């Protein structure tokens, strides 16, 4: 029994050490299916989704989803700490509990001894150093010293881990928030192109796509290293990193399939980087094994009705789509390169995908500001013409 306790303790401690190293220190996607972090997310995310879906109110449901990311981080750290306590407790138990415990003088059962071992392990890992239980062997003292060092290292990793996560989250959300004024809320490709339909808009659009090419690279680097960030929701219900990423991919697909020039070239670069990030993040969560991946071809984000609506919206921006069958075919081909992955990831994370073109809103701030700007420009032109014909007035 003591040999089995030693082996079990070794598995617990080495498992936590390897999992913490892969999750916090290793800057790449860990491999293997039997990881504590992966098993933890599988065991907790599915029940959390079931619990959240019971809420009928959309805002309440999104609030429940938003809690999971930070809460799962705390629970994961707690799980690591408990496994370390159990692992070192099993080590002490395999050494036949070499401690002097005043509370256990009249109790010699194995469970009582194991309880003392867990108590010593917990107080040692968290470096309390109460001293009410005294080790009676040099080996036990050596293990206690080693566990104290592990405890200090564990606390240091946690202290260094949290700021890195929230800095990456903050950088991600800044770009997502900026997209609100450029592509609407929630963002969509047609609105993004419409708001760049002005003189010099192509250069501005190319600059925007270049920024999002870098953003996609940062997402790929940070979210592959720290997949828990994918569960963190945006601060507003109409925003999410996934909908922002897919709307940029939609925009790039339209630019590549419809027009030529500088925006089309930058769209190709951004599309490749954004698709790379989307697929790799899907592989982290093994979405190819989910039911949504099996039914990916049954969902069409751009049915014929929405397609003609998109044609009308793009026609206002002088982008020819419906009149060119080859362009429409190219668009469908490009969509097939990323939409199945986006749909599967959306189903797993419960983050809705953006529409291709949103219906007009009654109180759209952008339309109101554009109308005011147009009226101001018209007034200035009228005054300029009037001053020419009536210079004395």
Image (cartoon, rainbow, N blue to C red):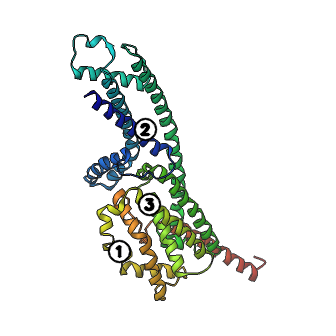
Q: Earlier in the sequence, mark 2 or mark 1?
A: 2
Check disc 1 and report its element: helix, strand or loop: loop
**Residue shown at 55%/59% (left/top)?**
217
Q: Which mark is residue 258?
A: none
How many residues crowd mark 1 within 10 Å: few (<14), some (14–19), many (20+)?
few
Residue 121: x and y, percent? 37, 24
Residue occupied by mark 2? 17
Quarter of the picture containing the C terminus is: bottom right
Q: Quadrant of residue 18?
A: top left
Question: Residue beneath label 1, please?
Answer: 300
Mark count: 3
CB-based contact (under 8 Å), mark 2 and mark 1: no
Residue with the mark numbered 3: 242
Residue under the image location 58 percent in, 76 percent down: 264
Dot 2 falls on a residue whose secondary structure is: helix
- Residue drawn at x 53%, y 73% as measured from the top left: 193
Q: CA distance from mark 2 to mark 1?
A: 44 Å
Q: Earlier in the sequence, mark 1 or mark 3?
A: 3
């Amino acid at each position: 029994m003591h040999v089995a306790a030693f082996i079990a303790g070794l598995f617990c401690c080495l498992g936590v050490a390897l999992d913490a190293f892969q999750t916090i220190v290793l800057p790449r996607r860990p491999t293997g299916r039997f990881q504590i972090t992966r098993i933890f997310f599988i065991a907790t995310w599915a029940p959390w989704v079931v619990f959240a879906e019971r809420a009928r109110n959309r805002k309440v449901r999104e609030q429940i989803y938003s809690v999971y990311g930070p809460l799962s981080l705390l629970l994961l750290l707690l799980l690591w700490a408990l496994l370390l306590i159990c692992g070192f407790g099993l080590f002490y138990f395999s050494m036949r509990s070499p401690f002097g415990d005043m509370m256990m003088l009249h109790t010699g059962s194995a469970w009582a001894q194991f309880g003392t071992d867990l108590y010593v392990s917990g107080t040692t890992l968290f470096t309390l150093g109460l001293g009410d239980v005294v080790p009676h062997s040099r080996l036990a003292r050596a293990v206690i010293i080693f566990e104290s060092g592990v405890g200090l290292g564990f606390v240091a990793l946690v202290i260094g881990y949290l700021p890195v996560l929230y800095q990456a989250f903050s950088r991600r959300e800044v770009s997502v928030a900026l997209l609100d004024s450029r592509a609407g809320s929630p963002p969509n490709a047609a609105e993004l192109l419409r708001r760049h339909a002005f003189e010099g808009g192509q250069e501005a659009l190319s600059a925007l796509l270049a920024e999002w090419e870098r953003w996609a690279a940062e997402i790929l680097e940070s979210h592959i290293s720290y997949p828990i960030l994918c569960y963190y929701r945006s601060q507003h219900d109409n925003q999410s990193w996934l909908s922002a990423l897919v709307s940029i991919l939609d925009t790039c697909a339209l630019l590549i399939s419809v027009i030529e020039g500088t925006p089309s070239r930058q769209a190709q670069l951004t599309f490749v980087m954004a698709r790379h990030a989307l697929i790799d993040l899907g592989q982290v969560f093994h979405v190819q094994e989910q039911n949504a991946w099996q039914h990916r071809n049954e969902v069409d984000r751009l049915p014929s009705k929405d397609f003609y609506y998109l044609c009308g919206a793009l026609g206002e921006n002088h982008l020819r789509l419906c009149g060119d069958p080859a362009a429409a075919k190219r668009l469908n081909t490009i969509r097939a390169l990323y939409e199945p992955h986006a749909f599967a990831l959306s189903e797993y994370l419960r983050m809705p995908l953006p529409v291709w073109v949103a219906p007009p809103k009654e109180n759209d701030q952008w339309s109101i500001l554009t109308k005011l700007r147009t009226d101001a420009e018209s007034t200035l032109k009228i005054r300029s013409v009037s001053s020419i014909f009536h210079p004395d007035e």
